Amino acid sequence: MASKRGKRDPTAGMPPDMRNAFQKVMSTFNTKEYNGDISNLMHHLSMQDPADVEALFSAATGSKPSEDQLSDFDYKSVPVRRDSFWVMQLTPMGFQGEDTKDYRDEYFPGSKPVFSVIIYDDRTSYLAQEMAPPGMPSSDFLINVLKKAIAAPLPPNSPCAPNLLLIAQKLSAHVGALRPFLDSLPAPFGWRLETAEEIEQVASGVHDLNVKGVAKATRRAEEEKRLGNEAVGRKDRTAAVKHYSEAFEFYADAFSQKPTATADEEHGIKRSMAICLANRAAAWLMEGEGRDAKKALADAERAAAFDEDYGKAYYRQAKAHQLLDAREKSIDVLTSALKRPSLASDKGLVDTLVDAYGGFPDSADELRTLCHRLFIDDDGDLRARDIREFVRRADVHVKKILGPEFSVTAV
């Protein structure tokens, strides 16, 4: 009886720990989305456990990209791929403060620039991509990235060296330190700094790639956000958090590529990132097992940092504070938000502020007491006195309960 031919097992021959890591990391990867585009695979890997990814890289390349492995690799005998070239680029990623979690797009006092060193080839395949410590990368760091690109490149690439390595002019200060290692590589390998013309060509090419990359990342983000919304609709907190997290990462990918310097484009992506975070906060706030007001508050605060004019970011902060029995903090958040011109008439925020104050009483005496505290007394609660829509609603209620001749400041 003929045996049934199956697909080749990609884990065959792997050590058990590598096989487990491969199966764990790749089990959730949709191969239909790969389409020969390594950026899809790299995004998937970026969302996984770093230890598992390191083991996966070891399995895919046949070697573990450790410091010992890199130092023991025989660079003088590495195969050179003829008629090929690599580009070594320095890409600015933003600024980081003393707190490693304080990461921003623009410089702020006390921050240091953060750079990514990228090596890619003439097939636009990424061979190495390493985030340097804050500040300009050291020569030793650059040499280490070069060694990884040669000895342990990102899959599906195999160890080799190019016919020509172009080094970005931004790294020219390191040429003296890089020269001994580069000159030790076998012929026909060669290297040089990129010319002014090549800088222009690379910039143009990167721009074109970024435009396509942003469009693709945005499409993926929208799909993940849609799936997150559906999960919220069926009260599936776990799925909602996962999909909103994926959507946020795809939008972050789009933002990091920055196809243009247009403020409207950047604001649009930041608004989308804020929406994902606020939606994830809403998922954390849903009733039931796993409800987490602290995580909701953290997400909502981050959402406001991405877009200060996104009302739901403040609404979710207020709801989280209320669940944490911090009513005064809830009022602080809401009144601060409603004093922003773009949010001054936000119905949801005003509704929530009325609720945070306990509503407008139907009792005449209680209503007078509340009005004195909120709108009249010099030593009262001043936070909502300048919020027109809140004052208007209170005034309507005063006239309803006390009569048309009364107002919030004349009770």
Image (cartoon, rainbow, N blue to C red):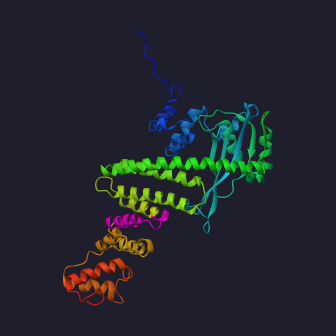
Main SS of residues in magenta:
helix
Q: Depth check: 258 or 111 in front?
A: 258
* Placement of the C terminus among the 4 image quadrants: bottom left
Spot occupied by residue 170 in the image (x, y as percentages of width and height): 73, 54
Spot occupied by residue 143 in the image (x, y as percentages of width and height): 72, 45
Identified at 48% across, 35% down, the residue is 31
Q: Residue 217 colored magenta?
A: no
Span shown in magenta = 304-323
**On the image, which quarter does residue 266 sit in?**
bottom right
Identified at 30% across, 74% down, the residue is 354
Residue 141 in view here: no
Q: Depth check: 3 or 178 in front?
A: 3
Spot occupied by residue 158 in the image (x, y as percentages of width and height): 64, 32
User: Does 113 appear above or below 383?
Assistant: above
Question: Does residue 404 appear left or right of residue 337 in this picture?
Answer: left
Identified at 56% across, 47% down, the residue is 213
The residue most toward the left is 363
